[in-house]
Image (cartoon, rainbow, N blue to C red):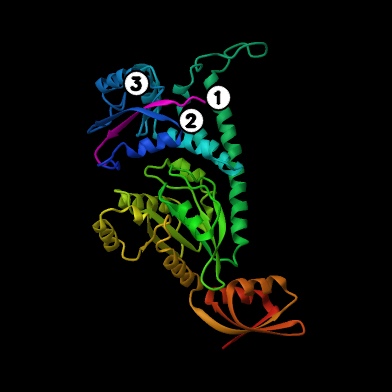
Amino acid sequence: MQTEQALIVVVILPGSTNDPQNPLGELRGLVRAAGGEVVDEMLSRRRRVNPGYYVGSGKAKEIGRRAEASEADVVIFDNDLTPGQIRDLEDEIKCKVIDRSELILDIFAAHAQTTESRIQIELAQLEYTYPRLRNMWTHLSRIEGGIGTRGPGEKQIETDRRLVQKRVSFLKRKIKDIDKRKVRQIASRDKAFCVALVGYTNAGKSTLMRLLTGADVLVADQLFATLDTKTRRWKLDGSETVLLSDSVGFIRDLPHHLVASFRATLEEAIHANMLIHVADASHPRVEQQIAAVEKVLEELDCHPAQKLLVLNKVDDIKDPTVLMVLRQKYPDAMVVSALTGQGADELTTAVAEISRGGLIKVLLHANCGNGRLMQFIAQHAEIEQQTYNDSTAEITAVMSADRLRMLKGFGEDVVITPR
């Protein structure tokens, strides 16, 4: 497949969230993640949006000349355009035009691996496309005819809209089923402490997961390299084990309908006992990226009992004052390098302490025939002494308060005596 040549355009408006030092940097990364090649770049500053071209008519003509000169296949805006603006720009530029939301949707579609994520992507794409049908399709004025349809007929656009609506309804039902199944899966893990990694795209979440769990997960210097949630066991201090989940990276101005569609993928984060928010400390806009992630978590109504900010990629920081300022701004954050392993032991210890919720020494009388009970004790307790009397095990162990409460759910098969 031939690589598409892209001319990228960033329009800076008052209140823009673009990096002032490198306003085109993120869009370059998105184009690369979509498999395109940037052949020319344009930056425009405006006080307000032009209703016709988004940019002014003179700038639209300049974009057309630059697109022709660079032999660009597509012009990509870092802004969200209306259907009418896309149509007018394409008429003026004589080239395909897409906006930020469509680019992100295309990247997600290319990277989705599971049936679940593909369904979510299709729904998001259809919801993006539906209001744009009138301006996107060239056959809107065609009247269907033929035997049995003679007469006034029906505009093709109305048929198209009805088909899209039908497909959207079908996909929403599928996603609702996925949501229910996901919640059941997570609920079935109620005897395990669940930790979810969240963060801005390319913050190093997958690298950190590989470091902590040894999991063979994709690690790539690319935006949205991870779309499908992966969960692995993470062995902490002693015998403690938690479940660690990676998740799709967030980004500023993420299309709202995409967040809604990906709710099932983010169920791991929504229902986790603890979130580890991974931030790229070496990025010049790290504070804005942290804020963007917090905004999406708020949209998802994600409020876990515990949350820990991790400043990653500290090995990439050249100026030590940068890290000093970040530590002052985020005094409770942990400093790590997922690449070199720096800070990994401290992070593991901190999560272990949080997951235990306070340690208690107990004497347990457990039924050896209850395999689930014995396995739970082996996984979630630090056993100091263990003896057997017929079918009963007498175990002296140290457990967290949370795990001890779960242990009581096994009923008469276990007797708990504080020591």
Question: Label 3 is placed on what type of residue?
Answer: Ser
* Residue 273: image location, x then y, percent: 50, 64
Give yes or no for residue 3 being in the magenta stretch. yes
Asked whether the viewer can see residue 101, the reply is: no
10 Å crowding of disc 1: few (<14), some (14-19), many (20+): some
Question: Label 1 is placed on what type of residue?
Answer: Asp
Tag nearer the camera, 3 or 2 = 3
Question: Regarding mark 3 in the picture, which secondary structure is present there?
Answer: loop
Labels 1 and 3: the sequence-earlier one: 3
Residue at the spot of label 3:
70
Frontmost residue, 180 versus 371: 371
Question: Label 2 is placed on what type of residue?
Answer: Thr
Residue at the spot of label 2:
129
Residue visible at 25% across and 54% down in the picture = 319
Q: Classify residue 252 as left or right of residue 352.
A: left
Residue at the spot of label 1:
160
- The range drawn in magenta is 1-15
Tag nearer the camera, 1 or 3 = 3
